[in-house]
Amino acid sequence: MQKTEHILYRIFTILLLIICSSVSAQNNLDSLYGIWQDKTQADSTRAKAYKNYIWNGFLYSNPDTAIVLTKALLLYGEKNKYPKAKSMAYNLIGVYNRNKGDYAKALEFYQLSLKINQEIGDKKGIAPVISNIGSLYYSQGDYPKSLEYYQRGLKIYEEIGEKKGRAPVISNIGSIYHNQGDYPKALEYYQRSLKIHEEIGNKKRSAPVISNIGSIYYSQGEHDKALEYYQRGLKIRKEIGDKRGIAFTMGNIGNVYKTKGNNTKALEYYQRSWKIYQEIGDKKGNAHIIGNIGEIYQNNSDYSKALEYFQRSLKIREEIGDKRGIAFTMSNIGNIYQAKANYIKALEYCEKGLLISEKIGILKEEKHACQCLFDTYKFMGKGNKALFYLEKIKVIDDSLAMQKTNKKLQQMELSKKMFADSIATLEKERLLEEASQEEVRKKNRTENIAFAAGVFILLLAAGLYGRVRLLRKSKATLQLEKDHSENLLLNILPKEIAQELKQKGKAEARDFDLVSILFTDFKGFTEASAKMSASLLVSELNACFEVFDGITEKYKIEKIKTFGDSYMVAGGLPLPTKDSVRNTVLAALDMQAFIIKRKAENEAQNKPTFEMRVGIHTGSVVAGIVGIKKFQYDIWGDSVNTASRMETNGAVGKVNISQSTYEIIKNDPEFAFVSRGKIEAKGKGEINMYFVEKRV
């Protein structure tokens, strides 16, 4: 009895800690948002608080919302002429694209952030962005380039005496050596980093370095030593309440137990890690750990369970656009179907995995998919097909061997570069010392002459500087005004139409044969508005439409207008594209998914909420600018009226499409359809309608 009470007490304590931690995190986010909203605060305080609000609250858990919020930070920097806010926003967009795997886009925004910090002379802002660029090259396997940027960042941190920033960069250099297989050198850098963190008492940063040291031992097969360091890191992360770090380290501990063949213990840690990733809404971590759980069930020959977890992992990876993860998981699913003797399904998934891995050029995943295809065709008794993929595996193995050789050459190049840098630094210090001594000798001889000349030059320079400064200020003001006008115009009109308007002074209306028109409408909006204050109503509507704006940008379709609680979008103009119909439907499904999720969240907090209908029709329209003042880009035609009927005859939580839209996307494997038959539509008679949803 006493033992039972003790267990119950422990469970209660853990639950209480989780609740308190969750409340504390939310309070911290609310506090940051409160600072951002407080217009009496300095620009630097507001911008930093909002950056942290986006980073801590959305960047990893809800990246699409994060990117919408980041645009507000960017506009704030432009409106208030505070470039530091723009540099923060560009850096956030860089991280967003890096997490998506779009390294080219990430580099573009990191460089924009870097340029601003260089212009305003903010070394404290320059160093972390340079380090981020180093991490980008690291992710792409360009280790010499990565090392170059890490060393540049490290040098700046040393110049400004910033120990806190220096330690992570040293750890990152350790990661390069770790990846190259130079474990002694990696360990040296990790320990240097750890020493600095411990000197300044930075527990939050020391925990991942301790885990990295654990990973060194794991890579060397010293599993007990690895476990010791992972547990040390886990203890610190629990002390400081670093949930993401706790989940990550538990996943590492699970990996050790899996390697040791203790699947029961591995599953225990994976499930604990998964629970935390769910709590904090970390989709990338969620997908990874769910995949690990699937592998445990696969090892235990529980193929139904393994398939369930792999499919859940795949769904999340597709949501966040993790292409490498998608390829890997597709092949895993193919292996499960192969084990269940469902060879048709096995081939389908393995071929998809191979196609994606070839597109992104990841040899390891290509081999994984080819092995799956080889085994499947072998079991099917199709020797020629099996032989084809066996040959591909051999070619990939040769390429991997070449990569291994290149890795060793890179390692030698890195060592050479480090040695050369050390020699260069010593030589630079010697030359500086000699120059300093020579300067002292010259100083005594030229002091009086320099003083007289200096006074004259100073007076002359003051006059010239004043003139130059005035010219620069005027030029900068004109440029800011021009940029502001440009941004306002692009916010109102599509880019192509804005260009035509600027060049010709007018923009001609055009006919488009294939445009998908999307309408949304909130059910019960009038009743809900009666229960809400005007400010709360507008705030809720704005929150929804901000996310919708982000979705339209994501799928490259054109927002036409909002009227009341309705939102209107068109895909396929002003530049028609082959995927416009598909993208419009995907956008509609994303919008509907967001509203369903938000309804559940609002109801849980006893807040008023909306439900939504969405309708889409595809047909011909006329598009152009209305009026000569307060320009508005609009569309007209019978297709617009039909699209409106699709919405009014739709259903809450569904996306209702017309026959013409269905005919274009009916063979797309991503969609599933429910025929509604002919529905009477006001002023249109009976129209064939379909509900569309993403295929599970």
Image: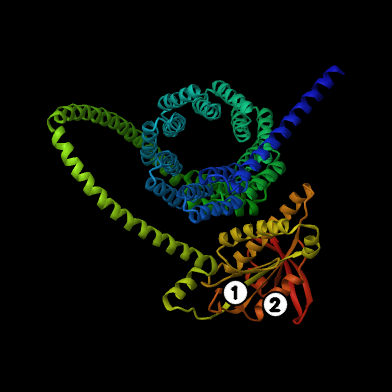
Which element type, helix, strand or loop, lies under badge 2? helix
Viewer-proximal residue among 375 and 336: 336
Look at label 2 and name its amino acid.
Answer: Thr
Q: Which residue is mark 1?
A: 515
Q: Residue at x 60, y 64 (%)?
A: 583
Q: Quadrant of the C terminus?
A: bottom right
Q: Point out the residue furthest to the right here.
A: 1
For marks 1 and 2, the one nearer the N-term is 1
User: Residue 440, image x and y in percent?
Assistant: 18, 27
**Residue 39 seen in the figure:** yes
User: Residue 522, image x and y in percent?
Assistant: 74, 64
Colour scheme employed for the rendering of this structure: rainbow
Say left or right for 38 vs 2: left
User: How many labels, in total?
Assistant: 2
Q: Residue at x 70, y 77 (%)?
A: 642
Q: Which residue is mark 2?
A: 642
Quadrant assignment, res 419? top left
Q: Residue at x 35, y 60 (%)?
A: 475
**Residue 695 seen in the figure:** no
Q: How many residues crowd mark 1 within 10 Å: few (<14), some (14–19), many (20+)? A: many
User: Residue 58, image x and y in percent?
Assistant: 61, 46
Viewer-proximal residue among 134 and 444: 444
Say left or right for 199 vs 595: left
